[in-house]
Amino acid sequence: MSEAKIADTKPVEVELEEGKRYFFCTCGQSEKQPFCDGSHSGTDFSPHIFEAEKSGKAWLCACKKTSNKPFCDGTHKTLCD
């Protein structure tokens, strides 16, 4: 599988709704970061589908290197700009 594009080197703050399904971009190409817009079409990538466990603010990964997909785990702090 190809390596994901780093969409940003800082997480994206979003408002999630409990029970709602979200499609997290894994390729880094989406114009609607951190969510999927279908830009992965024709690649080995597919969105990471998740359901929000609670409503409220969350920080989602934009560097695409997190080990806690889709949530930021601070990995972006180790990347060069």
Image (tube, grey):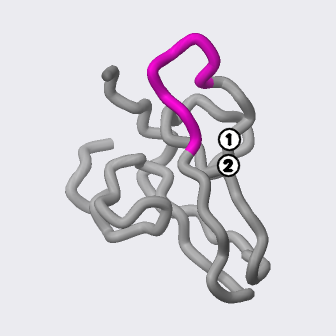
Residue 58 is a magenta residue: no
> Do residues under tags 1 and 2 come within 8 Å of each other at their CB atoms?
yes
Numbered disc 1: secondary structure: loop
**With 78 as the anchor, is 62 left or right in this view?**
right
Residue that numbered label 1 is attached to: 36
Looking at the picture, tell me which residue is in the foreground, 76 or 17. 17
* Identity, as a three-letter code, of the amino acid under mark 1: Cys
In the picture, the quarter occupied by the C terminus is top left
Q: Residue at x 73, y 76 (%)?
A: 16
Q: Which residue lies furthest to the left in this view?
A: 78
Mark 2 nearby-residue class (10 Å; few <14, some 14–19, many ≥20) = many
Residue 40 image position (x, y, % from top left): 59, 24
Residue 6 image position (x, y, % from top left): 42, 38
* Identity, as a three-letter code, of the amino acid under mark 2: Phe
Q: Which residue is drawn at 70% across and 58% down?
A: 22
Please provide the residue range marked out in magenta: 40-47
**With 74 as the anchor, is 6 left or right in this view?**
right
Residue 35 is tagged as 2
